[in-house]
Every structure is written in structure tokens, then in C-alpha cells.
Image (cartoon, rainbow, N blue to C red):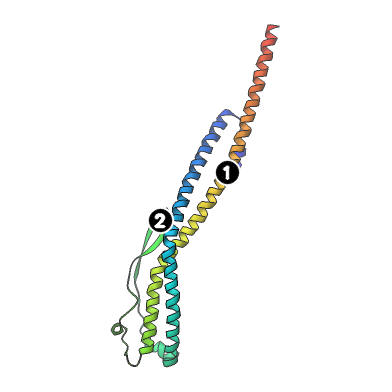
Amino acid sequence: MSELGRLPPTRSALVLGQRRAARFVKGAQLLRRKREALVTELLRLARPASAARARIADRTDLACRVLLRALAVHGRSGLRALGWPLRELSLEIRTSQVWGVTVHELASREPVRRTLAARGTSPGTAAPAALAADEFEILADLLLDAAPRELVLRRLGAALAQTTRQVNTLEHRVTPALEARLGTIRRTLEEREREEHTRLIWLTRRSRD
């Protein structure tokens, strides 16, 4: 912005300013197309994300109710004992680009939900705990599936906000300021031309006299 005010009132500066103005207009057009693409991508992802959030909310409510029943039967210490041993889950994260925005997605992962045999508990004595574990493993799978989509939505939303700010800055601040400065330069040059023309007329008449 400060550079615009330093453009001298010369023809070379006028040409340079006009080139800058053309670049600003082209840049604003590209940013508007990027903004439209980001909006389209966000709308495409919004409905699946909303449906996933609803499923997660329903499953969370169910899992918590089942957990309360398991706590009533086994107690906190009993559930902790039935949850042993701990297990590790491995997953692979892949980086990709969506409209120039870097996002991360799960390339592969192990399923969290296990069969009753894999859980290693007796179905008769640990039925409430096994049911609670099953519900929370289903919930964990839903969360892992939804997490990359939520991250993409967040990144795209931030990129959309930034692109909108850039478009507004170019269209409502930078370009108008440059056009105003170019207008001042044009008026100055026109005034100089009129003065030069008047001077030439005066010199011509003087030389005839």
C-alpha cells in the first residue's frame, strides 16, 4: 500500500501502475475462482460430515448408557481388570493437497472393533463389560473415520476465510488505492501537457513578434 503513494507522476510510472492494476485484477479473478472451488468442496463434504456427527452423537449416547450398566455390575476396578491387557493400534497417515491446501488422511488403519473371541473375556461373566467395550470400539471406529474429514473441513474453511480476505483486500483496498493514484498521475500529466502546450503557443507568438 505504501508503495502506491510513492509512484512518481511520470509516464513510466503510469505504465508501471497500469500493469500492476492489471495483475491485481487477474489475481482477484484467480482468487475468486479458488474461493468458488473451496465453497463447492466444502458443500460436498458438509453433508457426509453432518451425517457422521449425528451417528457419533447417537453412538456416544448409547455407549455411555451401556457403560453405566457395566459399572453397576462390575464396578470401576472390575472394569479395569477386564480391560487388561492394553493393546496398540497402528495407522498410516498420508498427506495430500485439496485446492492447494495441505490435508492429512488415514491411508490405512487397523479396525478397533474386535470379536468376542479376540477380546479374551468370558461371555457369561463379563457380558455387560464386553457389550460396553464393543460399543466404545464402534464409537472409536466412527471417530477415526470422521477425523480426517473434519480436519479437511477445518483446513478448507480456514483457506476459504483467508481467500475471502485476500479478495476483499485486492478489490476494496489495493486496487481502488492504485486506481486513485493512477488518476492523480493522469491529471498531473494532463496538466503538464496543457502547460507545455500553452508555453509553446506563447513562445511561438513571441518568436513571430
Measuring 38% from the left and 60% from the top, which residue is drawn there? 95
In the depicted view, which residue is nearer to us: 23 or 172? Answer: 172
State the CA–CA distance, disc 2 to disc 1: 28 Å
Neighbour class for label 1 at 10 Å: few (<14), some, many (≥20)?
some
Q: Which residue is drawn at 48% across and 48% down?
A: 32
Residue at position x 32%, y 89% from top? 123
Q: Is residue 182 visible?
A: yes
Q: Which callout, 2 or 1, points at the residue further toward the start of the chain?
A: 2
- Res. 207 image quadrant: top right
Q: Which amino acid type is marked by label 2? A: Val
- Using the rendered image of the protein, determine whether residue 6 is visible from the camera's viewpoint: no
Q: What residue type is labelled 1?
A: Val
Q: Residue 98 carries which label?
A: 2
Q: Name the residue under label 1.
A: 174
Front residue (pair 163, 20): 163
Residue 43, position as x, y percentages in the image: 44, 59
- Residue 187, compared with residue 197, is above or below; it is below
Q: Where is residue 201 in the image (x, y as percent from the top left)?
A: 67, 14
Q: How crowded is mark 2: few (under 14 residues within 10 Å), some or many (20 or more)?
A: few
**In the drawing, what numbered circle is on residue 17?**
none
Q: In which quarter of the image is residue 98?
A: bottom left
Residue 141 point in image, percent of width and height: 37, 74
Picture coordinates of residue 194 (x, y %)? 65, 22
